[in-house]
Amino acid sequence: MRSNWRDCAAWHSEKLPMNTSSNEACKLYDVCLSQFTGYYEEKQFGGLANSLNQMINSDPNFILGHCLKNGIELLGTNSAFYSNTLSDNINNLIKTSELLSNEITQREKFHVKAIEYLHKGDLVESIKIWEDILIDHPTDMMAIRMLASGYFYTGNSIEMRDSIARVLPKWNTNTPLYNYLYGFYAFGLSQTKELEKAEKYARKGIELNHLDGWACHTIAHINEYRSTFNEGINFLLKTENDWQTCEFIRGHNYWHLCLFYLENQEYEKIIDILDNNPSFSKPQMTIDLVNSSSLLFRLKLDGFKDSGYLDTKFKELKNVFNDRLIQHGYIYSDSHMAMIYAMCGTDKEKKVYLDSLQDFISDTNFSKFIRKLNLKISGKLYEALFSYGEGNFSKTVDLLYPIRYDLFKIGGSNAQRDIFNLILIDACFRSESKRHNTIGQGLYFERLAQRENSSLTKRLGDRYFINEFYENL
């Protein structure tokens, strides 16, 4: 996507100096930052992981290089919290920054501190630091990109939106990576339901770079929230060859395509993607886990008849990601692991899962923020999911209904968290409690008011309302 990479002098001219004197390290930093920002792999450098290693090898004392590498790992998966190697790397980064304290800038020191907090799961403190960096250095794309991820994991959509609005006018249009700001801003706007404005900025981003998979992804969100599902299908298929180049978002764009297909009950197209698209048939990344588990759960909620197929797929997912059974942290990804165990986990596995969650909450090596968030939400959420899988719908409602307005705090997008709305409505209708049934009616009307053209929503209600009542809606 790019061919000219910034050396030491170029970074200095942009008022973003770094402690390395290696032009190779500076250029590789640009290579890595470009891939991280654009959600793609730079093939000529062997992809992101290889680029990061090359960058560190070019200058082992490169402070921002280590910050970028460690930050990407920490934001990628809960497994990072349990990696001794990563812990050693971060401790070494802190020690190196202290030894070079008189040689590095305040900006570099701030980045180190943000990574230190991030390693403890204290996203709130990391976010504060990245925001502070951008006050004086609004073109620091690493701070912008890390901050966007921080707000994503805390569910703070307004803050995500505003963080881009504050820096966008301060960028020179010729500065590398400038075009991606439009997609970032558009996504924040989509999450705060400013859909017309979101579409304007997303399309501007695509105009500047038609290979911007994140901006294309934002258009998918807009169609989801507008309930213009056929438009969503047409857009994603029309631009498929463009966002296919973005390895870190393309699987998720296929997930959005499947949501549109699900509305139309085009199950055969969904199954084709599940069986033949590598992001689903050979999942590796956390986002693959999230996409696959939530899509399978949605198929179940929609009454997909081939339960044997769903069981097989859930078990395949469990086998791939079973090493994460006792790894907790970000509830956003952890809750999708819970979905898998809800559908195919043994009683022993579910007990281990919940017991290990309590161990995590009690572990003072992690910050109060992430432990308190898990204490307040995750235990109830995971038990609700397990209860649903066991057919105890009343317990699901009792656990999930009181926390439904807190679920934005687990992170993810509105579209991703919507799975919990669907589960709650279905559980209410299936519960033996008449009160729960009545609650379910209200939640159904609430959802229909937001998505009046959603056939999936209407099918959910159609299973429980008499035809005469439904026709009068």
Image: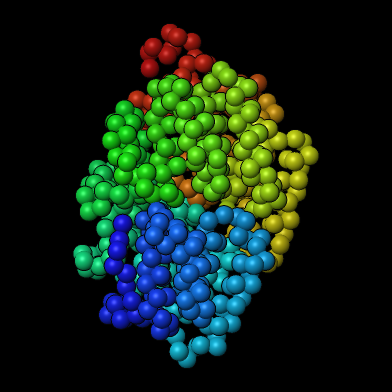
The quadrant of the image that shows the C terminus is top left
Q: Is residue 115 visible?
A: yes
**Residue at figure coordinates x 46%, y 22% from the top left:** 268
In the rendering, at what x and y percent does residue 9 appear? 30, 81
* Lateral position of residue 426 relative to residue 471, left or right: right
The residue nearer to you, when weighing 456 against 268, is 268
In this view, the residue farthest toward the front is 44
428 above or below 49?
above
**Residue at figure coordinates x 55%, y 88% from the top left:** 99
In this view, the residue farthest toward the right is 348
66 above or below 427?
below
- Colour convention of the picture: rainbow
In the rendering, at what x and y percent does residue 164 appear? 32, 60
In the rendering, at what x and y percent does residue 410 appear? 53, 49
In the rendering, at what x and y percent does residue 148 appear? 41, 58
Q: Is residue 126 visible?
A: no
**Residue at figure coordinates x 49%, y 22% from the top left:** 460
The residue nearer to you, when weighing 297 against 35, is 35
In this view, the residue farthest toward the bottom is 102
Tally of numbered tags: 0
The quadrant of the image that shows the N terminus is bottom left
379 above or below 80?
above
Q: In the rendered image, which quarter is residue 19 located in?
A: bottom left
